[in-house]
Image (cartoon, rainbow, N blue to C red):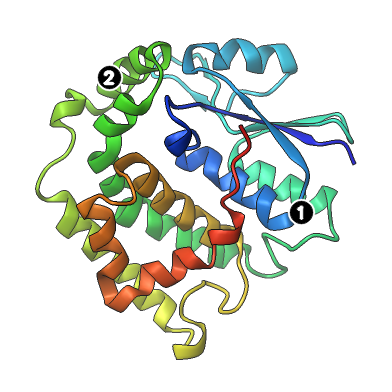
Amino acid sequence: MEPIVFYDIPAREPACMAWSPNTWRTRYALNYKGLSYKTEWVEYPDIEALCKKIGAPPTEKKPDGSDHYTFPVIFDPNTQRVVADSGAIAEYLDAAYPDTPKLFPSGTRALQAAFHQLLRPSVMLHIRNSVLLRVCQNLRPRSQEYFRRTREEGIGRTLEQAGSEKDWPMLVRGLTLVKECLDANGEEGNVLLMGDRICFADIQLAAMLTWMRVSLGENSEQWRKLLSLHEGRWAQFMERFSKYQQVDF
């Protein structure tokens, strides 16, 4: 098998090189499945040109109606397929490599979709507010300018104004809702959505938390507080992903 080409956005330093929650979904998926891949690092201003060059489809529309190209994107030389968007990539990997662990076990798609609908407003948005400025500071100069301009246009304020003292209590509230959902599995299986095995919805949550860890730093007060929250529940959750955090440089 030839290595899959995985496109990601670099930061300044190795410690935070892989930082994006969107691309971490695909990195976790590739690592979990044990598939061979190599990362091509692309700066923000170069993403659109690269996607057009390799035939990756746009994943969104800009406010003016034009196409918006985003990462993650993969090129699989074994099938000559180019796939964009983490969800589409996960589905592709399940179909193309059926002998690897499933990200969408049969009959779980609706459950996973519902779980993701809970995660976005409850967890991701509050992490975003907390890390936007630090993410920008961690990027290389060309990507910094692009990130600041586009994110400030999106939120309608400066990155310095993005976070507030309300973000932490709101994140705690959101993670409490997630915990209560997982508690329905019972004490023996309340760390992962499916109880004893990782699925794509778990990866989505792990990617959000990894975004926070990498952006703020493992020794930051916020990250330490999160790991101790709910009697260490989220430390246990992230431990399940520790073996899938490899980053190639």
Crowdedness near tag 1: few (<14), some (14–19) or many (≥20) residues, C-alpha within 10 Å: some
Query: Is label 2 in a helix, a strand or a loop?
Result: helix
Closest to the observer, 169 or 114 = 169
Name the kind of residue labelled 1 in the image: Asp
- What residue is rendered at 51% in x and 83% in y? 189
- What residue is rendered at 47% in x and 50% in y? 207
Alpha-carbon span between mark 2 and mark 1: 36 Å
Closest to the observer, 51 or 244 = 244
Q: Mark 2 points at which residue?
A: 153
Crowdedness near tag 2: few (<14), some (14–19) or many (≥20) residues, C-alpha within 10 Å: few
Residue 16: x percent and y percent? Answer: 43, 36
Residue 19: x percent and y percent? Answer: 45, 38
Task: Evaluate if marks 2 and 1 touch, with contact meaning CB atoms under 8 Å apart.
Answer: no
* Quadrant including the C terminus: top right
Q: In this view, does 191 lie to the left or right of 153?
A: right
* Quadrant including the N terminus: top right
Picture quadrant of residue 216: top left
Residue 238: x percent and y percent? Answer: 46, 63
Q: Name the residue under label 1.
A: 94
Picture quadrant of residue 153: top left
Residue 179: x percent and y percent? Answer: 35, 73
Residue 50's label in the rendered image is: none
- What residue is rendered at 60% in x and 36% in y? 85
**Mark 2 / mark 1, whichever is N-terminal:** 1
Query: Is label 1 in a helix, a strand or a loop?
Result: helix
